[in-house]
Amino acid sequence: MAHGRILQAPGPVKQAANAMMRATADPRPARLPYFCECGDPDCLRAVWLSPAEYDRRRDDSREPLLSDDHRRPLARVG
């Protein structure tokens, strides 16, 4: 059942949707709402980025785009 497969992998589905939105976005520096790419299939939080910010995030890392309240604090060393 396709619906079940989508719910099992919401992050990659949201990544694909974000890439499609970026590909069709106006290149001007207006901020756009991209999907939070967390693993919660019910999450519809937005990650607001300009097209250039989105491109930098994708070029720098394959880490998912996460809303501010879904970011994990960095572990302290020492």
Image: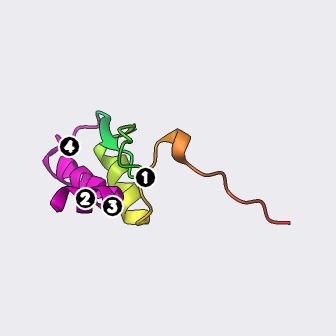
The mark that comes first in sequence, 4 or 1, is 4
Instruction: Indicate the secondary structure of the residue bearing disc 3.
Output: helix
Q: Which residue is mark 2?
A: 4
Dominant secondary structure (helix, strand or loop) of the stretch shown in magenta: helix
Question: Do residues under tags 4 and 3 come within 8 Å of each other at their CB atoms?
Answer: no
Question: Which stretch appears magenta?
Answer: 1-29
Measuring from the top left, give residue 15's x and y in whole percent: 29, 57
Marks 2 and 3 sit apart, C-alpha to C-alpha, by: 6 Å
The mark that comes first in sequence, 4 or 3, is 3
Which numbered circle lies on residue 38?
1
Q: Amino acid at mark 3?
A: Gln
Which numbered circle lies on residue 29?
none
Q: Amino acid at mark 1?
A: Cys
Marks 4 and 1 sit apart, C-alpha to C-alpha, by: 26 Å
Question: Do residues under tags 2 and 3 come within 8 Å of each other at their CB atoms?
Answer: yes
Q: Amino acid at mark 2?
A: Gly
